[in-house]
Amino acid sequence: MNYTIDDIKISSRIIYFLMKNRELKDDEDILYKAYSENENIQELVKLEADELGCEVRKFGSIIYFIPKEDNDFLGYSKGDLKKELCKSGANDKDYYLSQFVIMTLIVSFYGANGLSSKSRDFIKGGEFLNLVADKLSEGVKRSSENSDKDNGIAYSNILERFESLKSSDNQNRSKTTKEGFVNNILSFLEKQGLIDYIKSDDMIKTTKKLDYFMDWHLLNKNNYYRVLKAFGEEEVNE
């Protein structure tokens, strides 16, 4: 495919905009229209993004810039996430607990049949905290009953770390409490534009951004079904 100088210039402008803002909406008329209507520019943008270890995906009316899993320059490394999600001096148990909390949130909201994968509109923070505890306990029990089947999650270690955190009322935001640990993760996800965490109502809602990811990207990946399997959930047959 032959590319013009203008194609290359505009694709570079789109990449720069996406690196800076992580998303391109239709109110950015020139760049959005160029990507949506010009196959040359769209291909160039995707090629440039791939060289940067990223994907460019259009969900609904928004174009997203998504670092690939192993991209710790534009995305987060394990160490970076550990600093963001856990208390100082955190170990791997803290990190894996934080990832389990995020997986629990995904399974709580998504998995429905129909036009959307979303199965609920909101969940209360207290209910979600109880759900994390229940899923961990269920995982430990399931692992002991099926010791020959490794699902990749060390439930007993994660549950031990969770239970070592203090219990408190919702006003205590310290990362040394169960409530504070989960609250910090929810706040991080809110900063990423993935959820709305309404503290005054103790209510968690997902954003359109996360809904789009789940409907058009994540739910088409085998990784999601691995998460369901790890949680003892049944796969949904289309």
Image: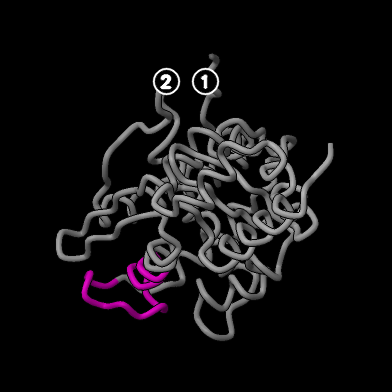
Q: Marks 2 and 1: which is nearer the front?
A: 2
Q: Nearer the viewer, residue 131 or 208?
A: 208
Q: Seen from this angle, which residue lies furthest top?
A: 238
- Which residue sits at x=67%, y=42%? 42
**Mark 1 or mark 2, which is nearer the start of the sequence?**
2
Structural crowding at the residue carrying mark 2, measured as other residues with C-alpha within 10 Å and reported as few (<14), some (14–19) or many (≥20): few
Q: Which residue is labeled 2 in the image?
A: 113
Q: Could you say where residue 40 lies in the image, as x and y percent from the top left?
A: 72, 40
Q: Seen from this angle, which residue lies furthest bottom?
A: 88
Is residue 85 highlighted in magenta? no
- Which residue sits at x=67%, y=49%? 55
* The N terminus lies in quadrant: top right
Q: Is residue 209 toward the left or the right of residue 50 in the image?
A: left
Q: Nearer the viewer, residue 4 or 180?
A: 4
Q: Could you say where residue 48 lies in the image, as x and y percent from the top left?
A: 75, 55
Q: In the rendered structure, which amino acid carries the disc numbered 1?
A: Val
Q: CA distance from mark 2 to mark 1?
A: 8 Å
Q: Determine the image quadrant of residue 71.
A: bottom right
Is residue 179 highlighted in magenta? yes
Helix, strand or loop under label 1: loop
Is mark 2 in CB contact (under 8 Å) with mark 1?
Answer: yes
166 shown above or below 163: below
Q: Which residue is labeled 1 in the image?
A: 236
- Which residue sits at x=38%, y=62%? 190
216 shown above or below 99: above
Q: In the rendered structure, which amino acid carries the disc numbered 2?
A: Asn
Q: Is residue 217 toward the left or the right of residue 206 in the image?
A: right
Q: Is residue 53 toward the left or the right of residue 38 in the image?
A: right
The residue segment tinted magenta is 168-184
Helix, strand or loop under label 2: loop
Q: Could you say where residue 202 lies in the image, as x and y percent from the top left?
A: 20, 59
- Which residue sits at x=56%, y=70%? 94
